[in-house]
Image (cartoon, rainbow, N blue to C red):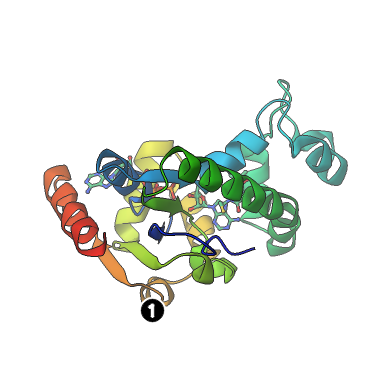
Amino acid sequence: MGLKQGATRLRIGLTGGIGSGKSTIARCLQELGAAVIDTDAIARSLTAPQGAAMQTISAQFGAQAVAPDGALNRDWMRGQVFANPEIKQQLERILHPMIGAQTEALAAAATTANPHTTLVFDVPLLVESGRWRQRVDRVLVVDCEEETQIQRVMRRNGWPREAVLAVLSQQASRQARRACADGVIFNEQLELTALQAQVLSLFRRWT
Ligand SMILES: CC(C)(COP(=O)(O)OP(=O)(O)OC[C@H]1O[C@@H](n2cnc3c(N)ncnc32)[C@H](O)[C@@H]1O)[C@@H](O)C(=O)NCCC(=O)NCCS
Ligand SMILES: Nc1ncnc2c1ncn2[C@@H]1O[C@H](COP(=O)(O)OP(=O)(O)OP(=O)(O)O)[C@@H](O)[C@H]1O
């Protein structure tokens, strides 16, 4: 199952808590020539209208889990998932194997297109899931203060503070994440240009 077998290019796992700045750093890495595989984006495509996970989700959680257009009712699901670990696990049991398969397919396609390209896997749950560590060569953790995560997500998503706290309570601690890291970017009070410079320096060191 390993992505590592027979590979010649570097595989970086990019992770961090909600709102830490993963997508922002993934964009920097893409500009530097890496191929980015975003597991949040895969999860969203699986739960779009006609998405491959929607029949199973509808059967498991009922009509309330499905929006009028046939996509996942994300607001309803988020309320369930981050209030109830059992429901979170039920959703993950459906989605995670599909996300894993799709990730492998996209990694294979990126490698066919360019065998030497660096692959970046943007995986929010890299530390929590345990299976990911052995599938990448390096783990890059994006870290920042929890209060910064809260303020960013409240502003970006228009969520109340409690909604962000509910997600944070279901994620690994900053300390647990840093313990898995080969590199850490502290994305706190950093202008975009300073952030880009840090990403470039780390990318040069690793590739
Ligand atoms: C619960 C859902 C419907 C909420 O959707 P919503 O549009 O509000 O959020 P979005 O998908 O953009 O995720 C935002 C952030 O929430 C956090 N998050 C998402 N899923 C999880 C989870 N299972 N456990 C902990 N944190 C999570 C991550 O930090 C993620 O970056 C959605 O996140 C989902 O389907 N989650 C299950 C799939 C999953 O585990 N995805 C993580 C990628 S491996
Ligand atoms: N250094 C920074 N300075 C200012 N704003 C930032 C910085 N880094 C990230 N942001 C902003 O914070 C928000 C969260 O960043 P981003 O979307 O990259 O995080 P993420 O870790 O991918 O989040 P999620 O886990 O919710 O997908 C975005 O609106 C982004 O523009």
Mark 1 residue element? helix
Please tell me in which quadrant of the rendered image residue 146 appears. Answer: bottom left
Amino acid carrying mark 1 in the image: Ala
Please tell me in which quadrant of the rendered image residue 30 appears. Answer: top left
The residue where tag 1 is placed is 179
Question: At x 57% / y 41%, what residue is drawn?
Answer: 42
Rate crowding at label 1 as few (under 14), some (14 to 19) or many (20 or more) other CA atoms within 10 Å: few
Q: Quadrant of the C terminus?
A: bottom left
In this rendered view, identify the residue nearer to me: 104 or 23: 104
Q: How many marks?
A: 1
User: Is 204 positioned to the left or the right of 91 in the image?
Assistant: left
Q: Position of residue 35 (x, y in %)?
A: 39, 43
Question: At x 82% / y 44%, what residue is drawn?
Answer: 61
Q: Quadrant of the N terminus?
A: bottom right
In this rendered view, identify the residue nearer to me: 171 or 179: 179
Question: At x 38% / y 67%, what residue is drawn?
Answer: 138
Question: At x 13% / y 51%, what residue is drawn?
Answer: 197
Residue 85 versus residue 75 in the image, above or below = below
Please tell me in which quadrant of the rendered image residue 137 appears. Answer: bottom left
In this rendered view, identify the residue nearer to me: 43 or 175: 43
User: Is 95 positioned to the left or the right of 121 in the image?
Assistant: right
Q: Position of residue 79 (x, y in %)?
A: 63, 47
Q: Position of residue 27 (x, y in %)?
A: 31, 41
Q: Position of residue 44 (x, y in %)?
A: 59, 37
